[in-house]
Image (cartoon, rainbow, N blue to C red):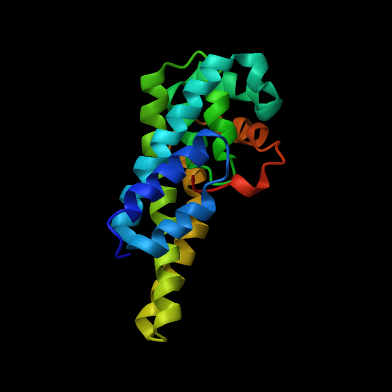
Amino acid sequence: RGSEAAPLLYMIIYAAATAVAIPGSILTLAGGAMFGVLWGTIYTTVAANVGANAAFGVARFLGRDGVRKLAGSRLEALDRATRDYGFRGLLTLRLIPAVPFNALNFGAGLTAMSWPTYAGATAIGIFPGTVVYTMFADALLAGSQEASREALLRILVSGALLVLLSFLPTLARRLGIFLPGSRSSANAALDSDDTGNRGAP
């Protein structure tokens, strides 16, 4: 945590990894362990958004045929979600931890969604997961360094938040905050073998 160059190096590596579809969940946890909750969240959020927007741009450049292999059958479901619900559709998918982050980055670039809409929904949608994963990593590090009741409590709280995060879209749908039909779109988006890149960016 003491190197001045570490934050910049971390963000460059994270953004580059995201842009080329390398799973970032491990890097998110590493950011929490290295920089703590506050700065880990800030650095990861900035890097994840830069990488996600770069992937969106790459998809637009390569075109539908060039990225179809990565996104697969989820393209049609994503097309429907963004066409019918736009910002809310992408935001809801971003909030579902099990939806593959990288596939969504590239897939969204192949839809008619505007770049500002994508960037806004991505920035808001990935933030809760980033905070929770960063908190969890920081709590684990604290627990390994000090066997105190406070450290254990932090691990339990952050672990509980990880579980609750999975139910956030369902709760929002029940409250009528996001699109009511998000379950079908989410299920289609889950039709992937990208198991190493689910949850936080």
In percent of the image, x 53 and y 55: which residue is there? Answer: 26
Q: Which residue is at the front of the view, 130 or 186? A: 130
The correct choice, above or below, for 48 with respect to 53 in the image is below
Residue 21 in the image, given as x and y percentages of width and height: 57, 36
Q: Which residue is at the front of the view, 112 or 81? A: 112
Residue 195 in the image, given as x and y percentages of width and height: 67, 47
Quarter occupied by residue 153: bottom left
The correct choice, above or below, for 104 with respect to 167 in the image is above
Q: Is residue 135 visible?
A: no
In percent of the image, x 45 and y 79: which residue is there? Answer: 144
Q: Which residue is at the front of the view, 96 or 130? A: 130
Q: Which residue is at the front of the view, 152 or 6? A: 6
Quarter of the figure with the N terminus: bottom left
Asked whether, in this view, residue 29 is left or right of residue 9, the answer is right
Quarter occupied by residue 157: bottom left
Q: Is residue 145 visible?
A: yes
Asked whether, in this view, residue 2 is left or right of residue 181, the answer is left
In percent of the image, x 43 and y 72: which residue is there? Answer: 141
Residue 67 in the image, given as x and y percentages of width and height: 64, 22
The correct choice, above or below, for 35 with respect to 67 in the image is below
Image mark count: 0
Residue 101 in the image, given as x and y percentages of width and height: 54, 39
